[in-house]
Amino acid sequence: MNGEQLAHWLEGLGLADQLAAAGLPSFERDLGGVVRWRDPGTGAALTDDQLAELDRVLHQDGEDPAYAVPLALVQLRRQAEVRAGLLASPTHDYAGLARLRGVSENAARFAVHKAAERHALLVVPHDAGVLVPAFQLDARGELRPELGAVLEPLLAARMDPWRVWAWLTQPAGLLGGRIPHEAARDGDEVAIVRHAAVRLAERAGR
């Protein structure tokens, strides 16, 4: 494929926006709609050889290159979609958590850091700050008691906090499609949720 064909193919798959995140050359269209491919390191226009190599890399998944789909970009798109959904759910920053707990912002920040060190609170980095997902908190802004034993193995395994957030708030295969943090509210189910969390943490640590 030439540069225009490659760009059109990626646009058709909805994957054009994932190129930069994958560290690959990306493109933009000028006012006339002409595609301009750029090297991610130098910003220089791609040579024909570089475009050919990019074409080869993007078509290397699958037995038939003509129908191959760049799986890494598909995974990045899925990850971006999941993160967007998570960010749309209720969260707290330090100031918001301080208001909920009725303490100073400095006190809330200190408490969050200490809890995170103990693997007793899910804290997610975002935009040079942190977010505390609200699903894990009770009405007073404290960690729901039943979630402590569920969070601990996941956080102790140093799993990506975004992955922990996603697993706890979406249907989980290890739980027959139930949402872990909701299932944990049931005293008869919380041990099963913790067992699933331990298994996930073990897989993540391999």
Image: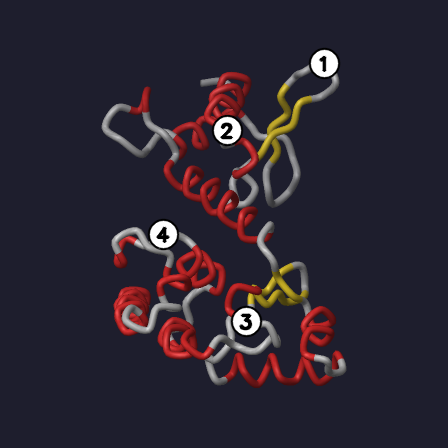
Which residue is at the front of the view, 2 or 90? 90
- Real-space CA distance between mark 2 and mark 4, rounded to the nearest whole angstrom: 25 Å
- Mark 4 or 3 closer to N-term? 3
Left or right: 91 as drawn, with respect to 182: right
Q: Residue 152 occupies which quadrant of the picture?
A: bottom left
Which residue is at the front of the view, 1 or 154? 154
Mark 4 lies on a secondary structure that is loop
- Real-space CA distance between mark 3 and mark 2, rounded to the nearest whole angstrom: 36 Å
Check disc 4: other Cα within 10 Å, few if <14, some if 14-19, many if 20+: some
Q: Which residue is mark 3?
A: 137
Residue 171's disc is: 4
Q: Is residue 82 visible?
A: yes
Kindly identify the amino acid type of the residue bearing the numbered disc 4: Pro
- Real-space CA distance between mark 4 and mark 3, rounded to the nearest whole angstrom: 19 Å
Which residue is at the front of the view, 36 or 113? 113
Check disc 2: other Cα within 10 Å, few if <14, some if 14-19, many if 20+: few
Is residue 177 depicted above or below 25 in this figure?
Answer: below
Q: Nearer the viewer, mark 2 or mark 1?
A: 2
- Real-space CA distance between mark 1 and mark 4, rounded to the nearest whole angstrom: 45 Å
Mark 1 lies on a secondary structure that is loop
Mark 2 lies on a secondary structure that is loop
Q: Residue 110 occupies which quadrant of the picture?
A: bottom right
Q: Which residue is mark 1?
A: 32
